[in-house]
Image (tube, helix red, strand yellow):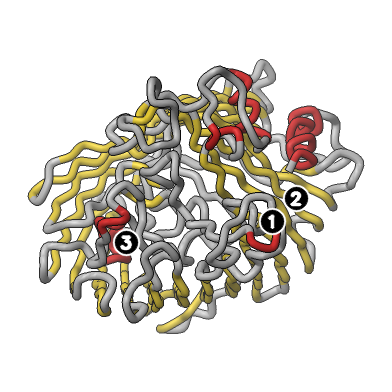
Amino acid sequence: MRFFLFILSMVPFLGFSQSETKEPVIYTDSTTNYVEFVGMGSTNGYTPFWIQSNQYGIVPVTGPNLSARAGLEHYWTISKNKTRNEWRVGVGAEAVGNFVQKNQFLLPQAHATIRYKNWELYVGRKKQALGLADSTIGSGSYAWSGNALPIPKIYLGTTRFVPVPFTKGWLSFNAFYSDGLFENSRPITENLKFHQKAFYLRIGKPHSLLKLYGGFNHQVQWGGRLKKNLGVTNDESLNMPSGFKNYVNAVIGAIGGSGDDITFFDSTSRIGNHLGSIDVAMEIETYETSIFLYRQFIYEDGSLFYLTGLKDGLTGIRVKRKNSYGSNFEINAAVLEFLYTKDQGGDIFVLGDGKKRGHDNYFNNQQVRDGWGYYNRTIGTPFIPPTSQTRWKWPNYADNFTSNNRVMMLHLGLQGTLFRKIEWQGKFSVSENSGSYLEPFIGSPRQFSGMLMMQSKLDILGGLTVKGAYAADIGDLYRKTYGFMLGVRKDFSFY
């Protein structure tokens, strides 16, 4: 881990050095400018899994719901040389209002950004895809899936893979470093801080037949204060380790902390709640097809370091067609994924014994007891849900985030066109859920969640997009639910 941190610290110097690969003069910045109205309903007052999951926390888990959404984003060139746009500044905001079942106003995006070439520094909330996996029709990366509202933070990183100097474009990196804050309405903690970084390498040029990828992402919940004593802090203080020295310990993942208030729990553990994945992938590109194979290895409590948690992780393959032949029915992309989190290094945890370093208890933590969530939504894979969203609730987990982190799931995602004008998308997932080692579920309830969505652009008002979806949850983990979504959207541009 410390080797990766050293490499990450050198990234800014590498990125601003002269490269042998000639970069384009004009840099493009994607923007989102739209107005949208959405309505949804269901058979029992709950929103189906695939209508509300991985939507950046803007779709309520209960319904019916009416939603009004709008987004504005723009970048301006500030370079002295007007023939180049190396320096840009931008602002963006996205607002969502939900009504009927519950009234709420959300800001999934609100940021101020400055960019230089393929680097950016921003403050605020911004939607972000993370990890080597498909982010469109897949189930979502293990540690960071887009299932919750973006966490407000200060972020410095690349906007794409950037060539490493003197490699003629054969070696590239994509990396970032950020710090932020969690919400204070959490049930157990307040003033909780957030640290996140990632570093990925690519071997191969952008259009090479074969490209290899590898890297890691690292998330930490640290600092802050407990709202009640859980037996892991001193009786006279509910403060968790904070300050610059403990921030450094959280960043590098060091064991033990600094300060007078360090408890036995802090001295024998890493400062904060650490989790993430180590990812590897391979991409094969031909004239007609792109094939992307990936694997995310999970780490949380040390099992992966001792090679006892290798069974757990997300494995996937995406096949994407590059050309359309104008058929009435086409499948342009397909994703097949397998998620397994049942091993967790085994059911036994003995401090100092690598062979018995199990019981990882994913997304739960015995100090940050409200776990890996943001506004009661899982930040990572939605297949490890908050206890409140399932039919299975246990007294032992009254102060823990999830009661179901031992999961086996198979997911199929499909994307294509119908009659050459209608875009369609399907997500179909089956899972077996075993609860946790502390409180196993009875009989490992099985669950199916599926959705079929279609949208088409009409020649009205300069181009209006209408869309609809039908989804179902059938099984023993969630309530049996059938639901729908209907929406209309207008995209526009400042240019």
Q: Is residue 335 above or below residue 54?
A: below
How far apart marks 1 and 2 lie (CA) works out to 33 Å
Q: Earlier in the sequence, mark 2 or mark 3?
A: 2
Marking on residue 240 = none
Q: Amino acid at mark 2?
A: Leu
Residue 206 picture quarter:
bottom right
Q: Along the line of sight, which residue is nearer the eye, 421 or 318?
A: 318
- Residue 361 in percent (x, y) is at 48, 57
Identity, as a three-letter code, of the amino acid under mark 3: Lys
Which residue bears the numbered disc 1? 353
Residue that badge 2 annotates: 201
Q: Viewer-proximal residue, 404 or 204?
A: 404
Q: Position of residue 150 (x, y in %)?
A: 41, 40
The amino acid marked with disc number 1 is: Asp
Mark 1: secondary structure? loop
Classify residue 2 as left or right of residue 373.
right
Name the residue that disc number 3 marks.
457
Q: Quadrant of residue 469?
A: bottom left
Nearest the viewer among 76 and 469 is 469
